[in-house]
DNA sequence: CTAGGGTTAG
């Protein structure tokens, strides 16, 4: 289960612990016996300096002693080392370690245990473990406990547990320290079962009653390990002795496990019961504010901590950095950064807090990586949390090159084997679309947990590798580690991306069985799965049967109605949502505005656009402006759309211009289209979409020379158009088709069906729209090209392989072409089948010769 | 000599 043959990373100053040369030892002891008259004097002074924390001076005193031929004894070193650990001056501690190695003294277990503690606390588990491994006979219960604890707080909980088991086999009997450490390691979903065994064990020993630390560890076992706050609270109530640490722990867990209000109430209880809140307590309730996104309360607490003189404490500082980042409604890091910059001392946590703030705030990923560089310059060593956030930033940026560099740093520090770093590494590749690398990163993990599985399943699903996604899903069920809400959510969104409604229904059945019926996020995922798979009726049913709705539920159903062309229904739902007192968010407004734009409701669109800031304080973002450009442009108000773009409070990005270019295509406005594509190319010179859209525009106007020019330009830049493809799910399998696809086993039947369809619909009045063919060839050949379009192939396959009672649901990665749209109407009439087609933008329901979009798209 | 509360991946 646990590999001991980890690649050994390069370490800083690895002192040797091999047994000393015996003759040399004799010399050492002979020096020791000859006591210089000043020896005790030097030693006393040194110890006094160390105890008051003047460590630099103490180390100078140590050097002076050695220069004068005096050999400081183990006690002197021990005091010095402890002081370094206590004051968290780990670099000085490591310096003492080097001097200790040079002194040739033989170390006893007490001193070595201090060294393990030093490296453990400085985040260097590799060196701590090397020292532990080299101890041999001298290893005692304290060493084992220190090592277990080291693994536990280095994010290697399973290794901590296996070390504990090794210890038991070795014959050591655990004490309260050891129990506290191993229970801590068990306080996560992977090891909670083991934790419960230890729980039974420890309750017989009496350590629960006698030791607050054991009690705290048990509170966490239930809270973090089992996710069961009620039981955690019961343990807390039963603790015979409480202190501010145990109170703070309980408050923190309430806040972290989604009950920040209860955390606040408990804080009041604590103060009323006469316990003094300290820096950790403040830190915890400031975090509760961040959870509640209550900026004003957070600011009040900020002024409180200023009064308590805790404002410059690193720990409180971290939570303030986090709170200001999470509560900034405009995504600005200004306040958070101000708090960070004012902190007099920075450590790993404060750096990690601000980096994480930048990453989670969205759109500040580059700054996060810059901060990391500054952190390195400041010689602060990052830990596994830091790397998690940084790799996430690289994933957000789709920049696997930077990610690989950062991952290399993690490898060097021995942190790549930490679960959350490995998981972020997979996620980084998956989000950059590099699934093969993601799979490699997944395969090299020492230990896979549920999160690892969820990431890879999600990656496969989002990148449309459906069979791989479900293969992994079956593996999860086999491992028995339990499928959780995240897995279901990933799978549902995967099924939704692919449009695999049969799979979606299966997952639905499974999650009902697993008891996730009333889980809000899952229900929301179901709404969007059914809607995105083309079954809006099922989506409505899920929505109606829910017990409670949040803004995501409402937004999902509004988006569903909008995408399926039911604009009025979408707007009615929005109204209803406001009446029930739910506050809309940015995403809700994207749904509302696009509902208007899909059907050309200009007045309503303007009304909502103006109201979003005025009535709800939501500042329109680029996407909202793009919706308005779409609404105006496609309704034919191209000049107004341009005027609108020029009046925007920020520079329009490529998305906005691409939207306008699309509208120019619909209305054949070549001049404006040229302008729009220039604007896109200026910002994204290597975006093939701009060239393709412009070339389509020229082609539909018959300007073949211009088409050729664009082709040539694209070739020079080696830009490739995203290949169009369509797919359909039948009997749990996704069949994917590209243009002119012939590799499908049933290709012969499919093309036969297509030929028959062509004849039939032409008789009914269908005229091929050869204008959309972008090649300058003969008419007849153009018609042939048209009947090789992927969406037509997919529909033909659907017709020959599905039963008549069900609608045919086809999905396309790009926008549906004009000729296909027209042909689908005829096909629906000729075959008396409903055809549901999802393109990159919206749904088209073809029924009896008409489309639900009323040809407005 | 070893211990408890603050950050993290989906």
Image (cartoon, grey):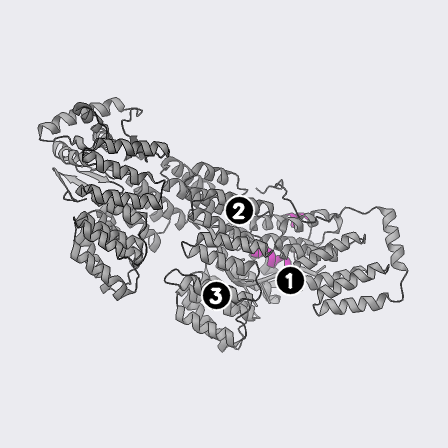
Cα–Cα gap, marks 3 and 1: 25 Å
Q: Position of residue A567 (x, y in %)?
A: 18, 52
Q: How many marks?
A: 3
Numbered disc in front, either 2 or 3 = 3
Dot placed on the residue nearer the N-terminal end, 2 or 3 = 3
Residue A592 can be seen in this image: no
Numbered disc in front, either 3 or 1 = 3
Residue at the spot of label 1: A88
Residue at the spot of label 2: A406
Q: Which numbered disc covers residue A193?
A: none
Do marks 2 and 3 both belong to one polypeptide chain? yes
What range is drawn magenta here?
A166-184
Chain at numbered mark 2: A
Q: Residue at x 77, y 52 (%)?
A: A101
Residue at the spot of label 3: A338
Residue A43 can be seen in this image: yes
Label 3 secondary element: helix
Q: Position of residue A172 (x, y in %)?
A: 69, 52
Chain at numbered mark 1: A
Q: Any magenta on residue A819?
A: no
């Amino acid at each position: 289960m646990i590999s001991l043959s980890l690649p050994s990373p390069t370490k800083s100053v690895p002192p040797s612990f091999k047994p000393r040369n015996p003759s040399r030892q004799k010399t050492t002891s002979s020096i020791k016996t000859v006591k210089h008259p000043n020896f005790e004097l030097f030693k006393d002074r040194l110890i006094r300096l160390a105890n008051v924390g003047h460590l630099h001076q103490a180390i100078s005193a140590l050097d002076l002693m050695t220069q004068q031929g005096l050999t400081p004894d183990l006690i002197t070193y021990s005091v010095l080392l402890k002081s370094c650990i206590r004051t968290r001056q780990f670099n000085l501690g490591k310096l003492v370690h080097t001097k200790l190695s040079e002194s040739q003294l033989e170390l006893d277990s007490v001193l070595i245990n201090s060294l393990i503690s030093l490296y453990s606390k400085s985040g260097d588990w590799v060196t701590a473990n090397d020292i532990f491994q080299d101890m041999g006979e001298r290893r005692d219960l304290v060493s084992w406990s220190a090592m277990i604890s080291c693994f536990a707080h280095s994010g290697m909980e399973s290794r901590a547990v296996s070390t504990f088991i090794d210890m038991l086999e070795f014959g050591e009997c655990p004490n309260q320290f050891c129990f506290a450490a191993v229970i801590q390691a068990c306080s996560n979903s992977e090891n909670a079962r083991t934790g419960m065994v230890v729980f039974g064990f420890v309750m017989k020993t009496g350590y629960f009653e006698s030791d607050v630390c054991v009690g705290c560890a048990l509170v966490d076992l239930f809270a973090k390990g089992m996710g069961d706050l009620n039981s955690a609270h019961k343990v807390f109530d039963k603790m015979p002795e409480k202190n501010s640490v145990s109170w703070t722990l309980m408050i923190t867990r309430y806040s972290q496990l989604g009950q920040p209000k209860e955390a606040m109430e408990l804080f009041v209880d604590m103060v009323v019961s006469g316990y003094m809140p300290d820096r950790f307590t403040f830190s915890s309730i400031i975090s509760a504010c961040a959870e509640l996104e209550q900026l004003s309360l957070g600011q009040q607490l900020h002024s409180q901590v200023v009064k308590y003189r805790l404002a410059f404490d690193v720990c409180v500082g971290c939570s303030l950095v986090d709170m200001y980042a999470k509560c900034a409604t405009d995504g600005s890091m200004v306040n958070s950064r101000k708090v960070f910059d004012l902190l007099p001392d920075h450590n790993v946590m404060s750096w990690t807090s601000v980096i994480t703030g930048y990453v989670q705030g969205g759109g500040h990923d580059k700054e996060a990586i810059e901060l990391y560089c500054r952190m390195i310059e400041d010689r602060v060593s990052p830990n596994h949390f830091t790397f998690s956030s940084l790799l996430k930033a690289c994933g957000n940026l789709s920049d696997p090159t930077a990610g690989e560099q950062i991952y290399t740093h993690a490898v060097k520090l021995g942190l790549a084997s930490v679960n959350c770093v490995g998981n972020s590494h997979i996620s980084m590749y998956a989000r950059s679309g590099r699934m093969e690398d993601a799979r490699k990163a997944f395969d090299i993990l020492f230990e896979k947990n549920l999160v690892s599985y969820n990431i890879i399943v999600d990656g496969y699903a989002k990148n449309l590798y459906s069979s791989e996604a479900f293969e992994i899903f079956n593996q999860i069920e086999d491992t028995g580690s339990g499928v959780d809400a995240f897995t279901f959510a990933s799978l549902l969104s995967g099924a939704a991306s692919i449009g695999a409604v049969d799979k979606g229904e299966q997952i639905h059945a499974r999650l009902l069985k697993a008891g996730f019926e009333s889980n809000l996020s899952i229900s929301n995922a179901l709404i969007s799965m059914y809607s995105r798979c083309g079954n809006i009726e099922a989506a409505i049913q899920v929505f109606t049967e829910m017990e409670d709705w949040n803004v995501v539920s409402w937004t999902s159903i509004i988006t569903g109605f909008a995408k399926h062309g039911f604009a009025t229904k979408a707007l009615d739902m929005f109204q209803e949502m406001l009446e029930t007192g739910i506050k809309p968010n940015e995403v809700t407004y994207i749904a509302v505005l696009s509902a208007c734009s899909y059907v050309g409701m200009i007045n309503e669109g303007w009304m909502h656009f103006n109201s979003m800031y005025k009535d709800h304080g939501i500042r329109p973002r680029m996407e909202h402006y793009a919706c308005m450009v779409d609404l105006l442009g496609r309704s034919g108000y191209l000049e107004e759309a341009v005027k609108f773009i020029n009046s925007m409070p920020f520079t329009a990005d490529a998305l906005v211009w691409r939207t306008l270019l699309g509208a120019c295509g619909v209305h054949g406005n070549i001049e404006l289209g040229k302008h729009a594509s220039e604007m896109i190319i200026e910002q994204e010179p290597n975006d093939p979409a701009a060239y393709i859209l412009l070339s389509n525009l020229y082609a539909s106007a018959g300007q073949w020379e211009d088409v050729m020019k664009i082709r040539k330009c694209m070739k020079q830049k080696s830009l490739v158009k995203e290949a169009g493809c369509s797919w359909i799910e039948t009997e749990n399998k996704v069949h994917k088709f590209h243009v002119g696809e012939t590799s499908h086993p049933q290709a012969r039947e499919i093309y036969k069906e297509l030929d028959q369809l062509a004849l039939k619909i032409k008789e009914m009045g269908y005229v091929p729209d050869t204008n959309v063919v972008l090649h300058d060839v003969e008419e007849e050949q153009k018609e042939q090209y048209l009947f090789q379009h992927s969406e037509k192939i997919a529909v033909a396959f659907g017709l020959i392989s599905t039963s008549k009672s069900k609608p045919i649901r086809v999905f396309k990665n790009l926008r549906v072409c004009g000729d296909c749209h027209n042909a689908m109407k005829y096909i629906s009439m000729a075959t008396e089948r409903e055809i549901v087609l999802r393109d990159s933008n919206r749904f088209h329901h073809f029924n009896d010769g008409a489309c639900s979009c009323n040809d407005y798209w």
